[in-house]
Every structure is written in C-alpha cells, then in structure tokens.
C-alpha cells in the first residue's frame, strides 16, 4: 500500500515537472499561451500599457492630505513594529520625512526582516544626512545576507544622490 502511494507521488511529480518544462520551452520560443509571438503585439497596445503603468505609478506617489499624513504620524507611536514600519514607509514614500527617525531606530532592532525593510526604505529616499547611519547599520549587522542586501541598497542610494546632485541646477551666489 505504501509503495503504491510513493509511486503515485512520483508520477504526479514527474507530470508536474514535464508540464513546467513544456511551459518554459514555449516561453523560450517567445510565445505566450495563445501562440502569439511578442513581435505580433501592436504598438498601440504597448503604448496603452505604458500609459497605464505611468498612471498607476503616479497614483502611488500622489500627495496625501495633511489629515492622512497626521493619521500616519500618529501610527509612528504604535506599539507594534509592523504598523510603525508601514506608517513610516507611507510617509517617506510621499515625501514626509517624519518617519525617518522610526526607520533609523528599527535599524537597531532584533528582527532582521525589519532591519532590512527599514534600511531599504531609507535607501530608497536617501539624503546625505542618513548615509553615515546606513553605513553604521551595515557595520553593525550580524546577518551575512542582510549585510549583503544593505550594501547593494547603499550603493544604489549613493548613485541616486550623485544623480540628484548632477540634476540640481547650479546656483550662482549673489
């Protein structure tokens, strides 16, 4: 009886494996499920998708009202770490840096996932002021994988800051 169960299990695994292989071979040939090639997509459809993506992206970073911002600022004092992280992330995404101290404090926390998430959010919206804090967080990080992720995010943040400096208009002192 047990042997028949194992055999059935291996047959199911083999079937799933072959299904995955055939699906990936279709994708490698550049075809979707309907058999259409990527080249057959119309330019109009692609431009529509690009416009839709731009709309969605704009909605994500659309400004929040002062009432909403105040609501999220109040959540920064919540006893649950997850809620503080989410509130700080929302505020930072909308240009309100009042969540920055909470994220900096989370860099010293016990849970590596919260350390990484707070680091990534700070690196996503970098300022020259927080770069030393991010570098210190990397040095203090005990987890190898977290340190790797943080180093990559820091490099990206530093590049972003360099781009901001190059894009900023040069002001003549008067």
Image (spheres, grey):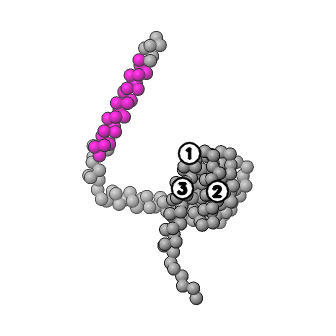
Q: To which quarter of the image does residue 71 belong?
A: bottom right
Q: Earlier in the sequence, mark 1 or mark 2?
A: 2
Q: Which residue is mark 2?
A: 136
Q: Which residue is mark 1?
A: 145
User: Is 17 a magenta residue?
Assistant: yes
Q: Earlier in the sequence, mark 3 or mark 2?
A: 2
Q: Which residues are magenta?
A: 7-31
| Whether residue 171 is situated above or below residue 75 in the rendered picture | below
Q: Secondary structure at mark 3?
A: helix
Residue furthest out toward the top: 1
Residue in view at x 60 percent, y 66 percent: 128
Q: To which quarter of the image does residue 50 belong?
A: bottom left
Q: Which residue is mark 3?
A: 153
Residue in view at x 55 percent, y 57 percent: 154
Residue furthest out toward the front: 139
Q: Earlier in the sequence, mark 1 or mark 3?
A: 1
Q: CA distance from mark 1 to mark 2?
A: 16 Å
- Mark 3, mark 2: which one is toward the viewer? 2
Q: Secondary structure at mark 1?
A: helix
Residue in view at x 54 percent, y 82 percent: 171
Nearest the viewer among 5 and 112 is 112
């Amino acid at each position: 009886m047990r042997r028949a169960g194992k055999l059935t299990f291996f047959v199911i695994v083999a079937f799933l494996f072959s299904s995955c292989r055939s699906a990936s071979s279709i994708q490698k040939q550049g075809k979707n499920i309907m058999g259409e090639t990527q080249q057959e997509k119309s330019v109009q459809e692609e431009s529509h998708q690009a416009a839709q993506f731009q709309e969605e992206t704009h909605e994500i970073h659309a400004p929040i009202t002062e009432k909403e911002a105040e609501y999220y600022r109040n959540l920064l004092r919540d006893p649950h770490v997850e809620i503080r992280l989410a509130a700080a992330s929302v505020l930072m995404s909308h240009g309100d840096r009042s969540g920055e101290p909470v994220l900096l404090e989370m860099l010293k926390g016990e849970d590596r996932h919260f350390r990484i998430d707070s680091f990534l959010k700070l690196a996503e919206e970098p300022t020259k002021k927080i770069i030393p804090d991010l570098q210190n967080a990397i040095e203090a990080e005990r987890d190898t994988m977290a340190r790797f992720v943080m180093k990559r995010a820091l490099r990206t943040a530093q590049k972003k800051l360099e781009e901001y400096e190059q894009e900023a208009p040069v002001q003549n002192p008067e």
